[in-house]
Amino acid sequence: MPPHERATPLAGVVTRRFERALEAILDHYESLHHLHPDTGSRALRLIDLVEGDLPRILAAHPDIGRPAQLSLTTSNSERNWLLRLAPLTARRRLQAREWLLGEYWILYFRTASAVYLASARHEREAEYH
């Protein structure tokens, strides 16, 4: 059966790393709140999506994004995280993908059985948290 005709959606997993990326985004907007009172409202909508529909959407449509260009990343934390993740997913054929949701890139990893939300960044940021 082709992946787009999957009978059962994959599991959607929000990783602790993804939660930390959202916290970093919120901290950034909080630091600007005194300059712009409505700063961060879009980030709050992203968090609402994560707590609601985003894991389910990606689990049901795991190919919605595009292949991620992880070789271009310059972040040491990103490389270290991928090195730790690789042994855990070695037999699961891990695919890195990213999806632009509004003004935020969502980095996720797809296996045959699950979608792991891995990180998020504003479209103007150069790398993931």
Image (spheres, grey):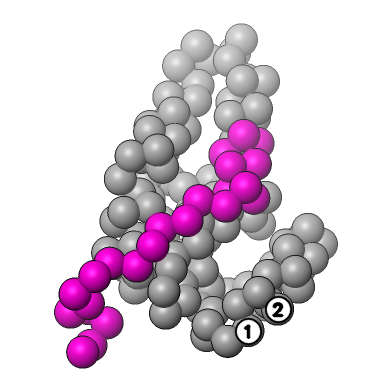
x and y percentages locating residue 45 in the rendered image? 38, 32
In the image, residue 24 lies at what x, y percent? 65, 36
Q: Residues within 10 Å of mark 2 (few under 14, many from 20)?
A: few
Q: Amino acid under label 2?
A: Pro
On screen, residue 112 versus residue 28, left or right, reads left
Q: Measured from the top left, where is residue 65 in percent x and y?
A: 38, 67
Magenta residues span 1-24
- Residue 19 sits above or below residue 91 on the image: above
Is residue 97 among the parts visible in the rendering? no
Q: Which mark is residue 90?
A: 1
Horizontal and vertical percent for residue 102?
36, 46
> Where residue 87 is drawn, which disc sits there?
2
| Badge 1 amino acid | Ala
Total count of labels: 2
Is 84 in front, or is 25? 84
Foreground residue among 77 and 60: 60
Q: Is residue 30 magenta?
A: no
Vertical position of residue 116 compared to residue 23: above or below: below
Query: Height in image: 4 above or below 51?
Result: below
- Give the quadrant of residue 113: bottom left
Q: Are marks 1 and 2 in contact (CB under 8 Å)?
A: yes
Q: Secondary structure at mark 1?
A: loop
Mark-to-mark CA distance, 1 and 2 = 5 Å
Is residue 11 something that shows in the picture?
Answer: yes
92 and 20: which is toward the camera:
92
* Residue shown at the point (43%, 24%) measured from the top left: 41
Q: Element at badge 2?
A: helix
Tell me which residue sits at (64%, 55%) in the image.
128
Q: For residue 16: magenta? A: yes
Which quadrant of the rendered structure holds the N terminus? bottom left
